[in-house]
Amino acid sequence: MPRQAVITQPEPRAEGDIFSNTALAKSLRKSVSVLTKFLASLPAAEPNREGRVVGNNPVDKLSSSEQLILELVNRERLAAGLEPVASASQLNAAAQKHSEWMAAGRRLDHTGAGGSSPWDRIKAEGWTEYPMGENIAYNPFNQSRPAPGEYVPQNIIEDMHAGWMNSSGHRANILNAGYTVLGVGDAIGGHPRAPGNATDYATQNFAGTTRNYVTGVVYDDADKDKFYDMGEGLGSATVAIFNSSGLTVATSTTDPGGGYSIALADGTYTARFSGDGINGTIEKRFTISGKNRKVDVLDANAGEEPPAPPVGTDGNDVIHFSNGDGFWENGVARNIGRAGIDTLVVNEGSVFKTSGLSWYGFERFIGASGNDHVRGNLDTVDYYLQGNGGNDTLIGAGGDDTLIGGTGRDTMLGGAGNDTVHYGAGDVFWKNGRAIDVGGAGMDTLQLEDGATFRTNGLSWYGFERFVGAGGSDSIRGNNDGVDYVLNGGGGNDTLIGAGGDDTLRGAAGRDTLFGGGGNDTIFFGTGDHFWENGRARNVGGTGTDTLRVEEGSTFKTNGLSWYGFERFIGSAGGDTVKGNSKAVDYFLNGGGGNDVLGGAGGDDTLVGGAGADIFVFGNAWGADKITDFADGTDQIDLSGVSGLDSLDDLSITERGGNVLISFAGNSIELVNMTGAQIGAADFIL
């Protein structure tokens, strides 16, 4: 299920929470203070010294040393009960370029090329989601095991990782649950104080995202230690992802270090690995449910591995049931599955009904083509129930259950807990002519199977808070003002309508129609989506403080599209044109990447250009606005539409609290982190 990202980076403004107010920030500031004192003792850097890039790989791909850094981080996170972080190409590029810059200049500094901050570098690569964080380190070759002066790459990386984990601020980044993606860069240069001593410089760029990934590494575990080592990874292997219907949903190739990361919607998938050193093909089944999933291939050269249990390791049994098998002893139900995550598989031609058979000790059920009836019996178990063929009845209990009816006219009830119910054509959400609460208590997800279409005007979906569509044209309307709905249309021309809560609507592919309703809603705009009805602009956002986010690959221009009802805008990498249309609104406009044109209305607006050459437009009586990231020499302020303003001499330009204040006729523009000396005629359009 998608996550809600929270802004926590220490830069002026994005979405409210300022990192400097947290306990973690205090620890980080202390670490930075120590680092600053150390840097002050170093001689002047030599910017013209060239760094040698480890492995000489593309900047957005991970080499073997960088993959090792990622694997060490994920080992720490999994041991702490956290989800793994996935590799992200934009973060890899930002991290690699900064490591090369540090190596070239023989320096260790979070302030990089051109005075850039970590956030500047990350956003310059097109990444716009938050939170963000950075760790850096260097390690001279003559200070690492096994002996001074001997270069053992594995030891160099392991020692840097140990240093990060022994620092409270750096360890906090590695074990931050809000970070779900990571970029790694590794480069070799001279030592800051002894240029002849080769030194490894590494950067970790962390971020959060609303997407979920399957991530892992394909390698031949030569030393049989069941952990990745440099030189073991298989680059250019093919990774193909298939959904529960056997359709290919994604393909990728492994990085030079053997790693891969693929964004996926919630669901159950099979990963097929082949090529580049893999003996035959290897398949692994996994489920994405609201967080990243790590799927590794350890012994690629040994050929196809035995099918791994879908969840867990030792003690996870698979028992095949046929008609006539007994689960009772002396009239008492037996715990057949015993310890572990155990699966009951119904053999073809057999039918299973829990009303007549015990299945204590099982956590997973996979039916055949008969009409199975399966009910969970423990509230502490997260059941996985898959009916397959037939008209099945699947009923969860109090855990976070997953119900998949398969083909046929199935009836499914999630019960309490945060359940995921897969809907296929013909499934039933009614009983005796009345709508039933299929989701039950908890935060429940209705996910459509491929080929199915769902319309709430003909089917009840009471008890669900989240919806994930497939390729059809779905019509979904929230029915409870107390719920914060998350609606994802998938493919097709969908209609998604929230209710009174803080809803999130994402049409995805197709020409979608979106309405937020009441509450503080977030609506994702993609190419083809429309905000008009019968030739008239609609109030898409509804009441509340609503956010319009542009999907990657799409561009938004208010001169061709209405965005009534929105108060916040977050663009993508395209060149967006966004202008406020209500003087009563204090707009927050973030252009993201690309060359954007941003303008508020008459309120006190906050404008963030993001990467690219942006133009900030102001008209008469524009109010008291703020630009948080004005780039001198790149961005421009357009005052050509202001009456009575003929030259720069008409403006009052003063400095206030580290910022520049531009005033005219009772209106003002505040440029954050700027000085008056930086402002000149070239920054304006008159």
Image (cartoon, helix red, strand yellow):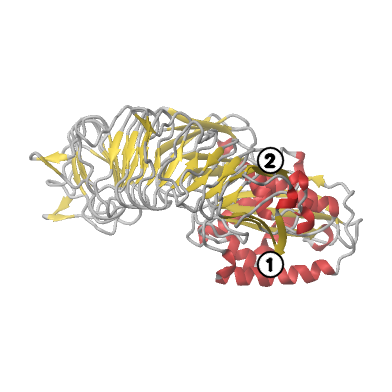
Q: How many marks?
A: 2
Mark 2 lies on a secondary structure that is loop
Residue 682 in the image: above or below residue 501 = above
Q: Which residue is labeled 1 in the image?
A: 657
* Secondary structure under the numbered disc 1 in the rendered image: loop
State the image coordinates of residue 624 (x, y, percent, origin top left).
57, 56
Left/right placement of residue 556 relative to residue 369 reads: right
Q: Is residue 539 left or right of residue 76?
A: left
The circle drawn on residue 322 is: none
Mark 2 → mark 1, Cα distance in angstroms: 26 Å
* Residue 302: percent from left, percent from top: 56, 37
Name the spot of residue 384 as percent of width and height, x first.
30, 46
In the image, 317 versus 229, the foreground residue is 229
The image quadrant of residue 616 is top right
Number of the front mark, 2 or 1: 1
Q: Is residue 345 something one can see in this rendering?
A: no
The residue identified by callout 2 is 613
Instruction: Identify the image quadrant of residue 131.
Output: bottom right
In front: 13, or 686? Answer: 686
